[in-house]
Image (cartoon, rainbow, N blue to C red):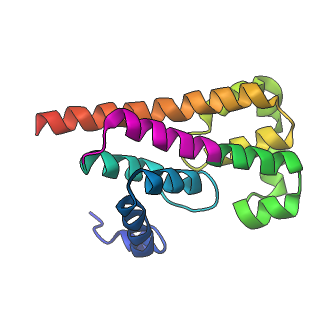
Amino acid sequence: MITNYSLLIPNFRYLCIVMESLLEFGYIGLFVGSLLAATIFPFSSDVLLLGMLVAGGEPVTTVVVATLGNWVGGLIGYWMGWLGKLEWLERWFRVKPETIEKHKAKVTRWGSLLALLTWTPFVGDIFAIVLGFYKAKFLPSAFWMFVGKCGRYICWAIIEGVIASAV
């Protein structure tokens, strides 16, 4: 069993310090951290959400704040894709043109519904960018993005509540 996570995740200690610092700012830190997690920073908004809940955050407020932050971060990705500047996407989001082209068929087939999956690890941010790049309708994309991200946080809050009540 690996106990030194820094072997698996580069800058693991740094990421833990950043996430812990964000939680010291309460709901504002949760919002900012959730927003950044959906854009260019490689850390988990799920961990921030759970940290806030474990620290005694009110569940509904915590879910709403995390959802809004992560949703705004996803919308930033959408608009960066909409602008269509491949050099920006490569530089800030580390998304190569080949990756964008690879997801074209998904956007063609599913359209704005693909935004429902923007919560997923690793590919969710790419879906948001690709939806913007291929000019998927904004309002339906924003709606499904919100639904997906909110659903994820509701699930985490329920899991945390069940575990907390069992302990």
In the image, taking residue 62 as reference, residue 54 lies left or right, namely left
Q: Quadrant of residue 140?
A: top right
**Front one among 6 and 39:** 39
Q: Is residue 19 magenta?
A: no
In the image, taking residue 143 as reference, residue 78 lies left or right, namely right
In the image, taking residue 27 as reference, residue 150 lies left or right, namely right
How many numbered marks have been drawn onto this rendered protein structure? 0
**Front one among 92 and 105:** 92
Q: Is residue 103 visible?
A: no
Give the magenta-colored segment's residue range: 56-72
Residue displayed at 63% across by 33% down: 145
**Front one among 118 and 34:** 34
Percent x, y of residue 82 = 85, 45
For the N terminus, the quadrant is bottom left
Residue displayed at 47% across by 43% down: 66
In the rendered image, the vertical position of residue 93 relative to residue 64, given as above or below: below
Percent x, y of residue 87 = 86, 64
Residue found at the very far left of the displayed protein? 167
Percent x, y of residue 80 = 79, 51
**Front one among 38 and 100:** 38
